[in-house]
Amino acid sequence: MHKRLMLFVPVAALCAVVGGTTVAGATRGSGVVSGRILAQGDFQDGLDAKFKVSGHHGTQVSKIDGAGRAVVQEIVLGPGGHTGWHSHPGPVVVVVQQGVLTLYDGADCSSGKTYDSGEAFVDPGQGHLHIARNEGSSNVVLLVTYLAPPGTGVPRIDRDAPVDC
């Protein structure tokens, strides 16, 4: 196993859980019922991926060359729970398995985009600042797949809240 991947495994298991903090003063998740890692694996063949995401804040392109690892996580947010403000080094595919999730973008945190059970979205990663909230009265269950770029150790980077949020 490559040295960078050997470091990724224990750090990812610790930091991928939504409540982890990696930046001083960063916002922590709240109301996180669980954040268990379901699976993780190293890509044996080269993977270059490009995502073009057209959303309510315009079009963003995320490109990853030579992805080294995929991590699949189940995140359960209780009523009123949130992930805390964060970003990802690489693209992230999210499926809302249960409940209703509201995603707020750091560029415009006054209006969120709502995703219902059975809907999916791609976070472009590469520093895209956001927070996910459960504004309902029952649990939200997310299935999240992180694509880790080469040389990155964690699939999630806790960040400070934007000044106007």
Image: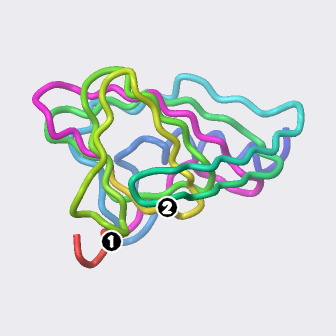
Question: In the image, 4: left or right of 27?
Answer: right
- Residue 7 placement (x, y as % from top left): 70, 48
In the image shown, does 98 or 83 lie closer to the viewer?
98
Question: In the image, 164: left or right of 149?
Answer: left
Q: Which mark is residue 25?
A: 1
- Residue 114 placement (x, y as % from top left): 28, 40
Label 1 secondary element = loop
Residue plotted at (58% across, 47% down): 11
Q: Amino acid at mark 2?
A: His
Label 2 environment density (alpha carbons within 10 Å; few <14, some 14–19, many ≥20): some
The furthest residue to the bottom: 163
Number of marks in picture: 2
- Residue 67 placement (x, y as % from top left): 77, 45
Label 1 environment density (alpha carbons within 10 Å; few <14, some 14–19, many ≥20): few
Q: Which mark is residue 128?
A: 2
Label 2 secondary element = loop
| Marks 1/2: CA–CA distance | 18 Å
In magenta, the rendered stretch is 132-159
Q: Earlier in the sequence, mark 1 or mark 2?
A: 1
Residue plotted at (51% across, 29% down): 37
- Residue 91 placement (x, y as % from top left): 60, 47
